[in-house]
Image (spheres, rainbow, N blue to C red):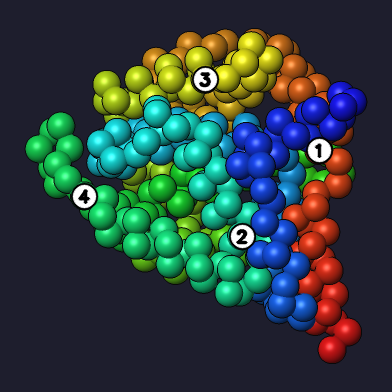
Amino acid sequence: MGLRDRIAAELTTALHGGDLKLERYAAPPGDPGLFGITPQDPVWRVHGQATGMLTGGFAALMLQSLHPLAMAGVDQHSDFRADPVGRLNGTVRFITTTTFGSAPAAREVIGLVRRIHTRVHGTAPDGRPYRADDPDLLTWVHTAEVRSFLAGHQAYAPRAHRLTPAECDAYYRQAAPVAEELGAREVPRTTSEAESYLTRMRPHLHATPAALDSVRFLRAFGRTPRERLAVRLLMNASVGLLPDWARAALGIHRPAPVRTGWDRPLATGLGRTLEWGLGPSQIQAAARGRLAGARQE
């Protein structure tokens, strides 16, 4: 097996569990998807750019961890420490299916996540009750996630493929219905609304011991030395996507010259290598084929 094939196999296993399940994206022919997303739309472009999604995904996990109730739910109910790859597979499956999948496939994964959320509830260490299906908590998780994905895309997509300010607003608008299907409310629909929302949330955010532990776990994750090195480089790069106040809250002290002059070039080089290894996305190709059926009919 050549280098490119090895990279593709390792990434497919790490991100998708080894099976892309292309039937979710290829059929039924002519199906426009639950949210009508096309290859020209900002959501497709952001969620289809591997380096931006990898760095943005790590940034999202760190930012989300600053909400004590969201972190309590993860800490008390998630198996991310025992099965981090399985947890990653589930998250990737949800994002790819709701973005590129058929309407039936998207409804299926949304229904699954909603059912899981009803079982996630408890009491945080500070004594407050929480529920994963709390609309306000869902809005936090979604906004932290899409804000991070967009930041990753704008930092690591080829310059010609980055979004204009108007397209960034369109990204938030197109991503919002997924969160609303899960039960979120008052979801930000523009860059300005997202940043205003984060400003309003800041008094409610801080790093709990569980949050700091989760960041340490992420930085050390990897099943092989090669995987641990890749994760460390991507995690370092994701730190640069966080707002300054989030880095401070997590106790991350990484000077701006290091973030821009060291972390970003290394992550860019790693990302290009990974994207080369993956080659053209089979998932996106299957989705394009399904959508082509709609144009022909």
Residue 121: give its label.
Answer: 4
Q: CA distance from mark 3 to mark 2?
A: 26 Å
Amino acid type, label 1 = Leu
**Going by the image, does 78 lie left or right of 9?**
left
Task: State how many labels appear.
Answer: 4
Please tell me whether residue 253 is drawn above or below residue 283 in the rendered image. Answer: above
Provide the residue designation for mark 1.
278
Q: Nearer the viewer, residue 280 or 148?
A: 280
Image quarter of residue 11: top right
Circle 3/circle 2 CB separation < 8 Å? no
Residue picked out by circle 2: 97
What residue is drawn where x is 41% and y is 44%? 198
Q: CA distance from mark 2 to mark 4?
A: 26 Å
Q: Tag 2: residue type?
A: Thr
The residue labelled by disc 3 is: 221
Work out how far the residue at label 1 is from the one at label 2, CA to CA, in angstroms: 18 Å
Q: Label 4: few (<14), some or many (≥20) within 10 Å?
A: some
- Pointers 3 and 1 in contact (CB under 8 A)? no
Q: Residues within 10 Å of mark 3 (few under 14, many from 20)?
A: some
Where disc 3 sits, the SS reads: loop
Contact (Cβ within 8 Å) of mark 2 with mark 4: no
Rendered image quadrant of residue 162:
top right
Q: Residues within 10 Å of mark 1 (few under 14, many from 20)?
A: many
